[in-house]
Amino acid sequence: MRLLIVDDSRSSLAMLGAIIRQSVSDNVELCLNPREALARAEAEQFDLVLVDHIMPDMDGMEFTAALRQRLTYRSVPIIMVTSDIDKQVRIEAIQSGANDFLTKPFDPIELQARVTNLLALRGAQLELASHAERLAREVEAATAHLHEREEEIIWRLARAIEYRDGDIGEHVSRVARISQIIAEGVGLDAQRCRTIYLAAPLHDIGKIGIADAILSKPGKLTPEELAIMREHVAIGARILENGDSDLIRTAELIAQSHHEKWDGTGYPDRLSGSDIPIEARIVALADVFDALCSERPYKKAWPLAKAYAEILHCSGTHFDPVCVNAFRARWAEIAALMAPAELAASA
């Protein structure tokens, strides 16, 4: 425990210092000038401060009020030493931030008792703060562990969906990353971008309820088959409905609405414009772009330049123009992400 004593009287300062060093602690710093004492308090952390009431230039109340303005001294005990026993003076001292008083001429035993008690209080404060900090670190670590487990489950489930869909490539991971890039480009905050990144891989979770014959059909689907295929949206929404976490709720929005179109010609609800959740608008663009660049049983992979031009062409019809602008602005990152897929397609 470190103590700071501030008094403009050399004799009073020396006496206070001697008594405390002899009976309480030798870790004491003495200061004649209150402004210099404030500078010392800025540079060092003291655990208890004794300050004289009457001093030139800056009195004890002004000093105490100034010290209390510093965040690290909001709870440090301060004893004001005063020869004034007027009630109003003590009230003003308390209002300025003093915790206790010592009346001149002071009794050494009383001084020792007051300082010891307040140092014990300070010790308890520090212990509680340390304990709270440890608990906060433990909670943070536990929360991070839960997030890691949640993320692992998401990615493993997404991989299972990908295999179910007949794609053993990196479609879901690319859609997730492109979605995150677009979300950043439209100005969403970091947490929301991260949530979209983790939710995007579940956009086609409903395909686990679609027959293999339709999912893997090499040719064009019949109108009846197309209607069945489109049911994956409702299936996915039902799988994810009533989620407790923001991640699952976001995934439900995406699963439900990622086939809606900006002009209202999509499905299942024919939503248009901003009525489509922004998360779904973002993933819709990322999903279509990566699907164009990926080989499927019914088509060859498109070159990046052709797929890029198609996304820009569909701005304002299929896709939200704001999302398309973000896609275009961050194209260098997206193209770099897609480079391995393009090489694989051309091999």
Image (tube, helix red, strand yellow):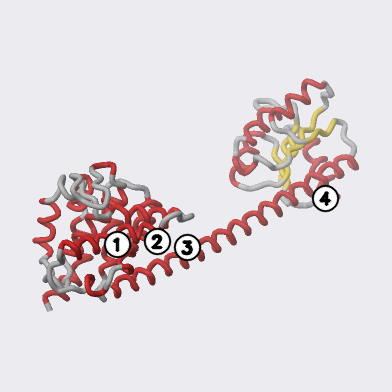
Q: Mark 3 and mark 4 in contact? Answer it, CB < 8 Å.
A: no
Q: Give the Cα separation between the discs numbered 3 and 4.
A: 49 Å
Q: Give the Cα separation between the discs numbered 3 and 1.
A: 27 Å
Q: Mark 2 and mark 3 in contact? Answer it, CB < 8 Å.
A: no
Q: Give the Cα separation between the discs numbered 2 and 1.
A: 10 Å
Question: As rendered, which of 158 and 188 lies closer to the eye?
Answer: 158
Q: Nearer the viewer, mark 3 or mark 4?
A: 3
Q: Position of residue 299 (x, y in %)?
A: 12, 70
Q: Which element carries disc 1, helix, strand or loop?
A: helix
Q: Which residue is mark 4?
A: 24
The residue depicted at 45 percent of the width and 54 percent of the height is 242
Chain-order first, disc 2 or disc 1? 1
Residue lying at the far bottom in this picture: please name it.
347
* Residue type, mark 3 in image: His
Q: Position of residue 62 (x, y in %)?
A: 66, 28
Label of residue 239 in the image? 2
Q: Which residue is mark 3?
A: 147
Chain-order first, disc 1 or disc 4? 4
* Residue type, mark 1 in image: His
Q: Nearer the viewer, mark 2 or mark 3?
A: 2
Q: Nearer the viewer, mark 1 or mark 4?
A: 1
